Image (spheres, rainbow, N blue to C red):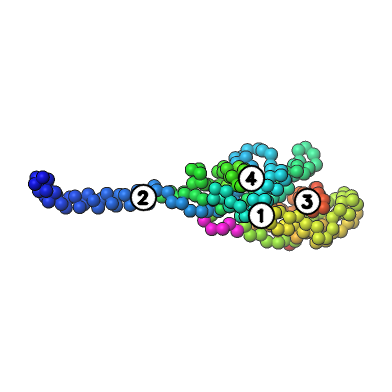
Amino acid sequence: MKKLIRLIKANILFLLFLVVIIVVAGFYISKKYVAKSSYIYVQVKVGQGLWWASIERPSFWLIRSLTMDKNNNLSGDGVKLISLNYYPSFQSIQGPSEFTNQFDVYVTLRIPVTKDGGGQYYFNRNLVSIGAPIDIQLPVTQFSGTIVNFSKMTLNNSTEERTVFLSKAGASQDEFQNVNAGDYYFDGQNKVFIVEDKSYQDGTLIIKAKIALTKSYGHLLFGENEVINLNQKFDFITNKAIFYDFVVDRIE
């Protein structure tokens, strides 16, 4: 015992140095590798979860189910549905456009995550990154999707209202009668397409509409994904009818 005490006294400086090294190393490891829990916001495009996969888009039954989760302010496993937006999907395969009764659906969620020392977030042990698949379970709805955006702060996809003139040559009188000022499309959050005026001359139907667009990298986008340019084809739906094969004439 006396020998042990003498040994400790003789090496007291070394032992103190060793203790300091252990404390500092422990602090570094805890900062770098021990995950911390928090919440972040993610925007998800609902689908199979693989952005490059060609799959069917959600139908209205899924939108109805997600609306129940949102309106009831419910949360599942710490996940909270903040917003829901949906836009009609049109297809044209060697012929005229056709509404598929499917939608491009986007949801904004608050999800619980852990953060490692490298600053990366994990949800259910899966890395949170743009383009990554994600599986979500809400009280009413279970779905998969692709992460298209995420942030520590609330995501704010601000839009700007632009006046857009749309025309269709060879339009029928029925099409002219089926559209009226005040007709609109509601995307789950707001009226993002509102008819302001119309005219019909020599078989050409012209519609003046107020459209909520997002500006991204010099482009105007409708519904998160559809680029709006002059002379571009534009199909749309209102609360009363479906319209195909219009062309963007002017954007103000």
x and y, in percent, of residue 53 in the image: 63, 38
Residue topped by disc 2: 30
x and y, in percent, of residue 2 in the image: 8, 46
Going 11% across and 48% down the picture, which residue do you hit? Answer: 5
Whole-number angstrom distance, CA of label 1 to CA of label 3: 24 Å
Whole-number angstrom distance, CA of label 1 to CA of label 2: 41 Å
Amino acid type of disc 3?
Ile
Label 1 or label 4, whichever comes before in sequence order = 1
Element type at marker 2? helix
Residue topped by disc 4: 141
Label 4 or label 2, whichever comes before in sequence order = 2
Depth order, front residue of 121/205: 121
Whole-number angstrom distance, CA of label 1 to CA of label 4: 13 Å
Relative horizontal placement of residue 234, taking residue 13 as reference (left or right)? right
Element type at marker 1? helix
Label 3 or label 2, whichever comes before in sequence order = 2
x and y, in percent, of residue 225 in the image: 66, 49
Q: Which quarter shows the C terminus?
A: bottom right
Going 51% across and 44% down the picture, which residue do you hit? Answer: 124
Whole-number angstrom distance, CA of label 3 to CA of label 2: 54 Å
> Which residues make up the magenta segment?
152-156
Label 1 or label 3, whichever comes before in sequence order = 1
Going 47% across and 49% down the picture, which residue do you hit? Answer: 114
